Amino acid sequence: MTHTGRHFLQIPGPTNTPDRVLRAMAAPTLDHRGPDFAELAADVLDGIRPVFGTTRPVVIYPSSGTGAWEAALVNTLNPGDRVLCFETGHFATLWQEMARSLGLDVRLIPGDWRHGVDPQRVADELSADTERAIKAVLVVHNETSTGVTSRVAEVRQAIDSTGHPALLLVDTISSLGSIDYRHDEWGVDVTVGGSQKGLMLPPGLGFNAVSEKALAASEKATLSRSFWDWRPILAANEKGAFPYTPATHLLYGLREALLMLQEEGLPNVFARHQRHAEATRLAVRGWGLEVLCADEREHSGSLTGVIVPGDHDADKIRAVILDQYNMSLGAGLGKLAGRVFRIGHLGDFNDLMLAGTLAGVQMGLSVAGVPIDPSGINAALQRLQRP
């Protein structure tokens, strides 16, 4: 089908890149060893810290979030170290698989993909580890495959309650710049981020926010590392440079995206995402469908996972919506394939965009033959009429 008008990209990342960011990236190539680049580097290296909630260094890689995962592991751990992981969804599963492939001893706590990390289970596992064999706890803050947000502050409290020295490594790839996050206050040791979601950029930048404890661990870590090694990067950053050719145009875009977040104010950004998430859940429940996240404390501000009735295929519904209404929704991943679709509501997004998104979903569900209440969208629209 030939479509007119804009395409609605409502997957939970990569997100729509704002015109301001695109224009900022449409700049001449500059000398990445010269003074103009040093100024750009200083702007982004300083400007990214508040988004992570840290006053400490943030390492920026020309990579995907997967690369930033690996960097977090190889800079802090040794071959054979035990790490505690939680099966909260597809991406948590992939991270623990990476840890295994790097020669780490993974202790994986199974999950139902509808709940986040259980802080009490963290405390139980660490209390039982009397030999202090567990060297790190890996947590995905916002599981992109499910729309479930783990309570990182409570996980930190659970670790502290046991007196265990394990590092806390947290993936914020789909929460950074969208959901309240506090690297320093919550005592996180390495926070992993990516550019293509709440930061409103194309894919291509990965981030590690690094605590003093993690930096000390990196001095003794013996997992193989070269490109991912924090030490030469941090040393070069002090001079406004990188030890390799950086992604200069993405850094131009990052500077503009950080300015946009600063202008709106991070508390307002987080509140906007939570408001849009609430409106989306109202629509889903109004249609008579079920939200995948099963704990009211853990609903994501970035995306909402929707369970389709058992006799329908979520991927066929997504195909109808794409064909009829030119809108892309997120697929169910892993064991959720065909059972779930995901509505992204993060990044450069406003009330009318959400209203259009929900209208497209409602029409698509009807065309696909899913029995829904056609007044379902009304509760969401009423929510959007309130601040």
Image (spheres, grey):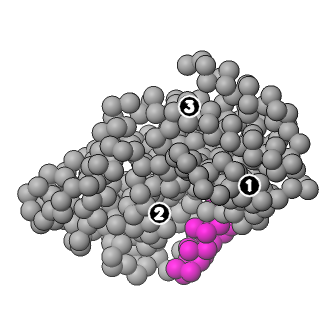
Q: Earlier in the sequence, mark 3 or mark 1?
A: 1
Q: Amino acid at mark 2?
A: Gly
Q: Is residue 99 above or below residue 213?
A: below
Specify whether 174 is left or right of 235: right
Q: Amino acid at mark 1?
A: Val
The numbered disc on residue 352 is: 3
Q: Amino acid at mark 3?
A: Leu
Residue sitting farthest toward the right: 311
Q: Secondary structure at mark 2?
A: helix
Q: Choose top left, top right, bottom left or bottom right for residue 265.
A: top left
Q: Earlier in the sequence, mark 2 or mark 1?
A: 2
**Crowd tier of the residue under label 1, counting other residues whose Cα lies within 10 Å: few below 14, some 14–19, many 20 or above:** some
Q: Secondary structure at mark 1?
A: helix
* Residue 107 coordinates in the image, percent (x, y): 66, 69
Residue sitting farthest toward the top: 386
Q: Is residue 57 visible?
A: no
The numbered disc on residue 320 is: 1
Q: Secondary structure at mark 3?
A: helix
Q: Is residue 130 magenta?
A: no
- Please tell me which residue is depicted at 90% across the width and 55% down the height of the picture: 310
Question: Which mark is nearer the camera, 3 or 2?
Answer: 3
**Could you tell me if the residues under marks 3 and 1 are in contact, i.e. CB atoms within 8 Å?**
no
**Front position in the image: 253 or 166:** 253
Please state the total of marks drawn on the protein image: 3
Q: Which residues are magenta?
A: 92-110
**Front position in the image: 132 or 221:** 221
- Please tell me which residue is depicted at 33% across the width and 47% down the height of the picture: 21
**Front position in the image: 78 or 147:** 147
**Could you tell me if the residues under marks 3 and 2 are in contact, i.e. CB atoms within 8 Å?**
no
**Crowd tier of the residue under label 2, counting other residues whose Cα lies within 10 Å: few below 14, some 14–19, many 20 or above:** many
Q: Where does label 2 land, which residue?
A: 65
How far apart marks 2 and 1 lie (CA) works out to 30 Å
